[in-house]
Structures are given as C-alpha cells and as structure tokens.
Image: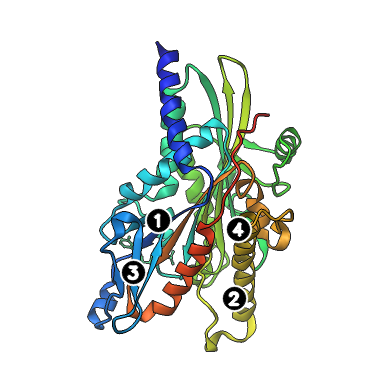
Amino acid sequence: LKYSEEIAKRKKLYNQIQEAKGNIRVFCRCRPLSKQEVSTGHNAVVDFDAAKDGEIGIMNGGATKKSFKFDRVYTPKDNQADVYADASPLVTSVLDGYNVCIFAYGQTGTGKTFTMEGTEQNRGVNYRTLEELFKIAEERNETYSYNLSVSVLEVYNEQIRDLLATSPSTKKYNSFLSLDNWLEVRQAAEGFHHVPGIVEAKVENIKEAWDVLQAGSNARSVGSNNVNEHSSRSHCMLCIMVRAKNLMDGVCTKSKLWLVDLAGSERLTKTDVQGERLKEAQNINRSLSALGDVISALATKNNHIPYRNSKLTHLLQDSLGGDSKALMFVQISPSENDLGETVSSLNFASRVRGVELGLAKKQV
Ligand code: ADP
C-alpha cells in the first residue's frame, strides 16, 4: 500500500514538475505602499486588474500604461503562504534529485528579504522550504532515506564569505562535514561546483536548520557599521544539499537547492560616484549583469555560458541551466517615486522569463 501511495504521489509531483519545466519561472511581487509613502502623498502606479492572468500594468505618467506578463503576479494583499504555495513544486522536486535555484531580485526596500526570510510571524520562502523538505522526507521514510545539510554564504564585493565558518556561535555544531565531503560530491557528480572548504551543517529537523540560518544571519552583521546597508549591497545565499537513497532500488541522488536574496538592483546615483560605495555598486552591477548574461546565453542556447564572470553566477552554475529549475521573484515597489527602478526591474525580469532550461534527471 505504501508503495502505491508513493507512486501516486510521485505521479502528481511529476505532473507539477512538467508544468514547471522548461524555463525560468518568474513571479512578480509588489509590496504595499509604506506608511511613509502614504503620509507623504505618493501615489501607487501599479495596476493589478489582470494580476490573475499574470499581468501587471505600470502607469507611466498620464494615460500611458506598460504591461508585463509573468508566471504569477502577487498583489500587496497576497500573503507568504500564497507565495510559497506556488514555489512548493520546485522545492519538492529537489527531493527527487533536481537542482533548483530560487532567487529574489529587485531594488532595495521592495521586499526581497521579506519574501525569502520573512519575519517570525510571517515566515518566508527559506523557512517554509526547509519545513516542507523535512515533512516530505518524513512522509517518504519507508521508501527513501534523506540527508539534508545547509551552507550560508555571502558575496560582497566579489568576495565569498562563509557565514557559518566565521560565526562564533556555529562552534556548537559539531556535525559539519569537511572539505573532503564537498570534493567527494564534486567528483561523484560531474558538474557539481562549490567553494573549497565551505562549511556544511548537517541538519535533522526544522529547529536545527533554523538555528543554523540564525547563526549565519548573525555572522552577516559582524564587522559592518550599518547592517541594513551592508545586506542591501551583498548577496545572501543559502545552499541546501540533499542526499537521497531510494530504499527500494538502492539508487542514490544528490541535489542542491539555492535560496538567494540578491543585492539591491538600483542603479548608481550621483551621490554614489566615489570611494567604497562606487566599488560596491560596480561589483553589484557586475554580478547582476553577469546573471542576466548567463540567462541570455541559456536562452539563445549559446555553447558558451559565461558562468565565470562573477562569483554569483559561478556559485549558481549547477542550478542555472542543464537539468535544473529556477524561479525568480522580481520584487517591486508600487510607488510613483520608484517608477524608473520598477520598470528597469520588470524589463530585466521579462528578459529572464524567455529562457528555456533542459530537463533531464541526473543520477549519481
Ligand atoms: P529588500 O530586502 O528588498 O531591501 P525588505 O524585505 O527589507 O526589502 O522590505 C522592505 C520593507 O517593506 C520591510 O519593512 C518589509 O517588512 C516591508 N514589506 C516588503 N514586502 C512586504 C509585503 N509583501 N507585505 C508587507 N510588508 C512588506
């Protein structure tokens, strides 16, 4: 009985994956007007009339309206559970051996961190993902044996920082796997790339996983004067490694899920044109445009995909292209004040949406 239930579940999941396959899905999420925007009389310029059909309209001054089409459009009224429900099929496919990447793109202050991390009362994609992975792993425990581990990285100014290695509070985790393990993974599964020496924290339940994420998050603020500014200028990257053994046929798979809160995509302003801030902005531009270039190269089925042009794309290599599945949240502000950045983000997202990825399940 267990076996036929399992087959039925997998069929259902397979259908969901079929629906999701073939391209980078793009979900557009608009935050509410902030209290400050309301009090200073800023108008909303976003039209959600056709949001149900994945369309979003931007009032571009006067009567002109520019429309964009995405796989989903969330209005400010849609909550964290609504958003996660649509991401869930991709997340669960990680347990079947697929590499997946979910990232949030957009101007600072548009809700990237709200979508990915959320708050304690309003959990975001990261927490819900881990919770669901453990739940399904438990449900399947007669047919599969799963091992989950988490790494937390930050990319700032084209430098990768391992937030678990640098956090004093992570010392309490004694189940870290070593560098050898990552190399072993890389050798066993052609195409697995990773940072040598990265800390991989083995986690057995949501509580442990959450503790690891908190430790990483605490380490992020160490050494920065302004935590908010620092996090808006760096990419925060969680990597969940899943090792699965099918207990019926003994087949093992390894897969990787990236959950990425990207640096703010806003362009340089006149006041930014010097010193450290200029360097940061150039590095952010470089990595976000490298991400766009990789995605374009995949779209045109170019033989050379320029993964190595930035640390960000280099890290995501296994989860962008080939047999992987990707989901991008393009986050926007509704305010007329942010119109330029909003249109620029929506243009970037439209370019991303055109991309097809191959789909072939990898076994190792
Ligand atoms: P970013 O990470 O893009 O810089 P944040 O996630 O920090 O942006 O969001 C900026 C502010 O807007 C935060 O106070 C956040 O709580 C709020 N916010 C963002 N999205 C939503 C939403 N969908 N619903 C309610 N508040 C939101």
- Indicate the amino acid at tag 3: Gly
Labels 1, 3: front one: 3
Residue holding disc 1: 115
The CA span between labels 1 and 3 is 21 Å
Spatial CA distance of label 2 from label 1 is 23 Å
Earlier-in-chain disc, 3 versus 4: 3
The response on whether ligand 1 sits within 8 Å of label 4 is no
Image spot of residue 364 (x, y percent): 68, 29
Expressed as whole percent of the image width and height from the top left, the position of residue 146 reads 54, 27
* Location of residue 343 by image quarter: bottom left
- Label 4 sits on residue: 295
Q: What is the CA distance from the residue labelled 4 to the residue labelled 2?
A: 21 Å
Query: Which residue was labeled with disc 3?
Result: 57
- The residue lying at 47 percent from left, 43 percent from top is 20
- In this rendering, the answer to whether 216 lies above or below 134 is below
Whether tag 2 and tag 1 are in contact, CB under 8 A, the answer is no
Colour scheme in use:
rainbow
Q: Which of marks 2 and 3 is nearer the N terminus?
A: 3
Picture residue at 65% right of the left edge, 46% below the top: 318
The secondary element bearing badge 3 is classed as: strand
Counting other residues with Cα less than 10 Å from the Cα at mark 2, is it few (<14), some (14-19), or many (20 or more)? many
